[in-house]
Amino acid sequence: MNRGLVISVLAGLACAAAVLCVVPGCSPKLSAPAVEVPGRFAQGLPGDTLAVAELDRWWEMLGDTTLNRLIDSALKNNKDVLAASSNIRSAQLNRKVQRAAYLPSVGVGAGWEKELQFAKGAFYVEPSASWELSLFGALRNTTRMADAQVSLSKNDYQGLMLSLSAEVASTYYTLLGDRESYRLTQKSYDDRKRSTDLIDSMHTHGMRSGVDLAQSQELTAQAGALLPRLRQAQVQDGINLALLLGISPHRLGSVEADFPVQGPPRVPAGLPSDVLLRRWDVAAAQDAMDAAAAQVGIARAQRFPSIPLSASGGVASQTLKGLVSGDPLAWSAAVGIIQPIFAFGANKSREGMAKEHYVQAVLAYEKCVITALGEVEAALAAVGNGRERIVSLVELVRASGEASRLANALYMNGMGDYLSVLQAEQTWQTAQIDLVTAQSNLYASFAALCKALGGEL
């Protein structure tokens, strides 16, 4: 029994070896990506270096406990993150499924049957085994493709979490900025209302013209009209933040935090080559390229012979007792070679399609690298220009505030007109709102920079 099975298997392997001797190039040659990486970032500073550890949980550099709590909550509860985590487990299980297709398969059947020409039926137990040998890289490339898909799902998960942390931070500071803008506008409205009441009283006694009163009322109404829009902006910010956290808006509650004015810390850019090693999307593009290369190998293997092995047998008897007594064993084994001969070019075309998919994956990888470097350059420029803008706006707020105070003083002493007061106050309020917006945008740019640099979680 066993000798026959062994002989059959050895014969099959001998045939396979003979085929391998005449098959030219089972492993296709594929072109590697060619991307030029600069020595430094144009928007960075000379000698600007960054250790990977410096970006570990990057948001904690801001020292905001409320932001830390929000991001940690989002990373645990965001529905897209949970779905990406499930996708990793699915890819890992798929790897096992793909490998199992090239491992021996064993089954067993049992039952009772009766043929018409015999008086008695027979009981039987029939195990069977089959195995298709992987001689042309099918198993290796299938495993490689499955491994790349697992790695790809992990990189997508990492990228999603990094993007989520940056988006939560940006939304959080937008909320604080809109809240601070509302506070400034409310204060401006209250001040203008008091000024309008005073001018109205003076107009009643003939000390101010109707034009002054109308202009004062106009200025007050402008501030009042801005308040509902800023309230709505805060409501929308809260809704956006709740969605990022994976909760209903009514569960968000009040986000207690003061608007930061000191600005985020400085983050060096580091070397472009180091950034590309940290970037999740570059790693994911590499995984996609590896999977495409493995698919080419699988398609190539389908053009060559396959070696199926099978064995079957078991025990049979007219009685249950006879199944375990005497010598009821009966086995058979078979080995063969299946060679694709003519399929109207389908197998060759299938390999050609796989090669084109690999070319597309290479181009996508090259584009990803270029995009990654461009995102870092843009983020560096946004942070640098944002800091410069804030410096100018701080001076503008100081100067326009002093101009507004002097204009009001001159008007109250009868030495100036109210139009000068109106213009000075409008300039001051606009400068204050612009400063708050610029500070909020700087924090958003800081988050985008950490994301572009490939911040760790």
Image (tube, rainbow, N blue to C red):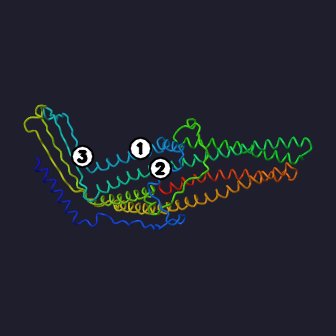
Mark 3 or 2, closer to the camera: 2
Q: Earlier in the sequence, mark 1 or mark 3?
A: 1
Residue that label 3 marks: 105
Residue that label 1 marks: 86
What element does badge 3 sit on? strand
Mark 3 in CB contact with mark 2 (< 8 angstroms): no
What element does badge 2 sit on? loop
Residues at marks 3 and 2, CA–CA distance in whole angstroms: 47 Å
What element does badge 1 sit on? helix
Q: Nearer the viewer, residue 231 or 409?
A: 409
Q: Which mark is residue 57?
A: 2
Type of amino acid under label 3: Ser
Residue 346, horizontal then vertical, whole percent: 35, 59
Residue 426, horizontal then vertical, whole percent: 76, 51
Q: Crowdedness of circle 2 by 10 Å Cα count: few (<14), some, many (20+)? A: some
Q: Earlier in the sequence, mark 3 or mark 2?
A: 2
399 relative to 31 in the view: left or right: right
Residues at marks 1 and 3, CA–CA distance in whole angstroms: 28 Å
Residue depicted at 18% across the width and 45% down the height: 312
Q: Crowdedness of circle 1 by 10 Å Cα count: few (<14), some, many (20+)? A: some
Q: Nearer the viewer, residue 82 or 58?
A: 58
Q: Earlier in the sequence, mark 1 or mark 2?
A: 2
Q: Residue furthest left?
A: 326
431 relative to 45 in the view: left or right: right
Above or below — where is 196 with respect to 455? above
Residue 231, horizontal then vertical, whole percent: 67, 42
Residue depicted at 47% across the width and 54% down the height: 55
Type of amino acid under label 1: Ser
Residues at marks 1 and 2, CA–CA distance in whole angstroms: 23 Å
Type of amino acid under label 2: Arg
Mark 1 in CB contact with mark 3 (< 8 angstroms): no
